[in-house]
Image (cartoon, rainbow, N blue to C red):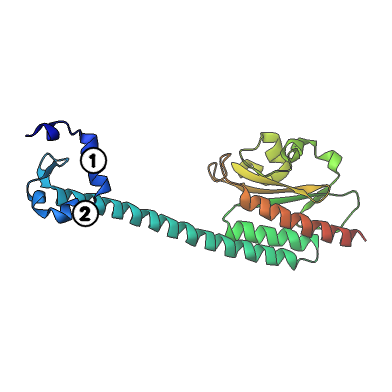
Amino acid sequence: MSDQFKQLTEAQVAEFLQQHPDFFTRNAKLLEKLHVPHETGRAVSLVERQTSVLREKNQNLTSHLSDLIDIARHNDVQFEKTKRMVLALLEAETLDDIAVAIDESLCQDFSSDITSLILFTHKPLDVNNLRLMNREDADVISSLMATNLPSCGRLSEAENTFIFADEAIKVQSAAVVPLVQGETLGLLSVGSFDPNYFTSSQGTVLLSYVGEVLSRVAYRVMRQQEH
């Protein structure tokens, strides 16, 4: 071996091959002499090794693409469910209509077990499917509304009892959404009998959207019924 080749380092060889990816195309006979140790210990040709690496990359890309397609399908389903709920809310003419629309959507389409809608007002209104009360009587849930942001997880025993009343003993996890439209209007709560259905690490983008739509609709209908 000449002194020139003795001075070549692995890094220099690697750099040369990176700059000349067609090197083995122009020197195909060298492939017959090159062997790369396989993970099993069996010697394989460079072409076989390259094919194996490319096949593995292809499998990974295929798996990733499949995951993306599944996510897209899931998002499409979620969008359709949310659209149905929003349309039902927009058609609501009374507070009871709102409560029914929310309960049907969240319990049927989104597989929750129970909903609770609490609205604050000082005026007596004719309702059957939700609770009306003075804001001053809701100190128990004040911490849930303090940030005006949705939250998920386990409620305290007092919060659970206040929100879900007779069904509280069954509720093991919940999502709560403060309703705000210039002022605090109330609280939407969605309960599950599964302790792991709603968790503190759960995303709340959908809940925030539902809260924004519901707040606007509830504000409009409450003002209409008050007059």
Which residue is nearer to you in this view: 175 or 131? 175
Residue 74 point in image, percent of width and height:
50, 59
* Residue 51 point in image, percent of width and height: 20, 53
Q: Is residue 45 left or right of residue 11?
A: left
Which badge, 2 or 1, is on the more N-terminal residue? 1
Q: Quadrant of the C terminus?
A: bottom right
Does residue 114 appear to the left or right of 42 in the view shown?
right
Q: Is residue 128 visible?
A: no
Evaluate if marks 2 and 1 touch, with contact meaning CB atoms under 8 Å apart. no
Residue 35, quarter of the rendered image: top left
* Position in image of residue 141 (x %, y %): 75, 38
Residue, disc 2: 22
Amino acid found under the numbered disc labelled 1: Ala
Q: Is residue 223 above or below residue 183?
A: below
Residue 55 visible from this viewpoint = yes
Q: Which residue is mark 1?
A: 14
Looking at the rendered structure, the secondary structure element under dot 2 is loop
Instruction: Please report the residue visible at 16 percent of the width from the left and 52 percent of the height from the top.
Output: 24
Q: Residue at left 20%, top 50%?
A: 50
Q: Give me the residue at 87% from left, 56% from top.
A: 125
Q: CA distance from mark 2 to mark 1?
A: 13 Å
How far across and down, in percent of the image, does residue 76 sit?
Answer: 53, 63
The N terminus: image quadrant: top left
> Mark 2 packing: few (<14 Cα in 10 Å), some, or many (20+)?
few
Helix, strand or loop at label 1? It is helix
- Left or right: where does residue 197 sit relative to residue 97? left
Q: Amino acid at mark 2?
A: Asp
